[in-house]
Image (cartoon, rainbow, N blue to C red):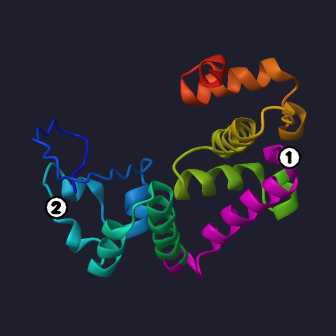
């Protein structure tokens, strides 16, 4: 395991199976409780971070989606254990669930009202726990959810179902989120 703050050259062999996991800023520390600045430019044996049975299971899986799901479930389990009694975590989770249940239509002000907290408190909780503002987080969530639906079923996709004004608004959000035009994905 290593951080991406240095250039590392490696010769890949045919027998190598490389599976890369990238964390958002603060994500690694949130899941594992290890400060990234203490890791620095050191290369760390992954066996010191992840249990050997998880790594063995991961190596035996042939399907990329199953590997992703296995690691995601493990990371979420660690995160949930860490924050089980944390009010800040529960409030942010409630905000995400409330936003999702509102069909991604609530503003930050409406969410704060539903959770009986102020806008400023909602903002502070997201910045402390996730590292970004709630507006940015919900924009990513909205675009990712809509794009996933669009890719799986273009014929019945409606941008209105995800809070977009029209298809042009959705396309602009996709460019902002992915860096690619939607038309490039349709080929």
- SS under mark 1: loop
Where residue 132 sits, quadrant-wise, is: top right
User: Which residue is found at the position 62% from the left and 57% from the top?
Assistant: 125
Left or right: where does residue 32 sit relative to residue 126?
left
Circle 2: is it few (<14), some (14-19), or many (20+) Cα within 10 Å?
few
Q: Position of residue 126 (x, y in %)?
A: 61, 53
Q: Which mark is residue 44?
A: 2
The image quadrant where one finds the N terminus is: bottom left
Q: Which mark is residue 106?
A: 1
Where residue 161 sits, quadrant-wise, is: top right
Q: Is residue 33 visible?
A: no
Q: Position of residue 93 (x, y in %)?
A: 68, 65
The one nearer the camera, 102 or 167, is 167
Left or right: where does residue 92 sit relative to residue 71?
right
Left or right: where does residue 13 sit relative to residue 4?
left
Circle 1: is it few (<14), some (14-19), or many (20+) Cα within 10 Å?
some
The one nearer the camera, 54 or 117, is 54
For marks 2 and 1, the one nearer the N-term is: 2
Is residue 112 depicted above or below 79 in this figure?
above
The one nearer the camera, 187 or 11, is 187
Numbered range of the magenta stretch: 81-110
Main SS of the magenta part reads helix
């Amino acid at each position: 395991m290593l951080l991406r703050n240095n250039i590392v050259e490696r010769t890949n062999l045919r027998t190598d199976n490389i599976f890369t996991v990238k964390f958002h800023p603060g994500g690694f520390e949130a899941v594992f409780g290890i400060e990234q600045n203490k890791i620095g430019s050191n290369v760390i044996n992954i066996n010191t971070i992840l249990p050997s049975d998880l790594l063995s299971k991961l190596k035996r899986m042939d399907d990329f989606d199953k590997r992703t799901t296995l690691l995601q479930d493990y990371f979420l389990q660690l995160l949930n254990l860490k924050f089980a009694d944390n009010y800040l975590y529960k409030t942010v989770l409630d905000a995400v669930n409330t936003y999702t249940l509102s069909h991604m239509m609530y503003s930050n002000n409406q969410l704060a009202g539903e959770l009986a907290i102020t806008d400023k408190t909602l903002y502070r909780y997201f910045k402390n726990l996730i590292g970004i503002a709630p507006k940015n987080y919900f924009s990513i969530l909205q675009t990712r959810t809509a794009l996933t639906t669009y890719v799986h079923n273009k014929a019945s996709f409606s941008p209105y179902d995800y809070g977009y004004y029209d298809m042009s608004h959705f396309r602009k959000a996709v460019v902002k989120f992915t860096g690619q035009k939607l038309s490039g994905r349709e080929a």
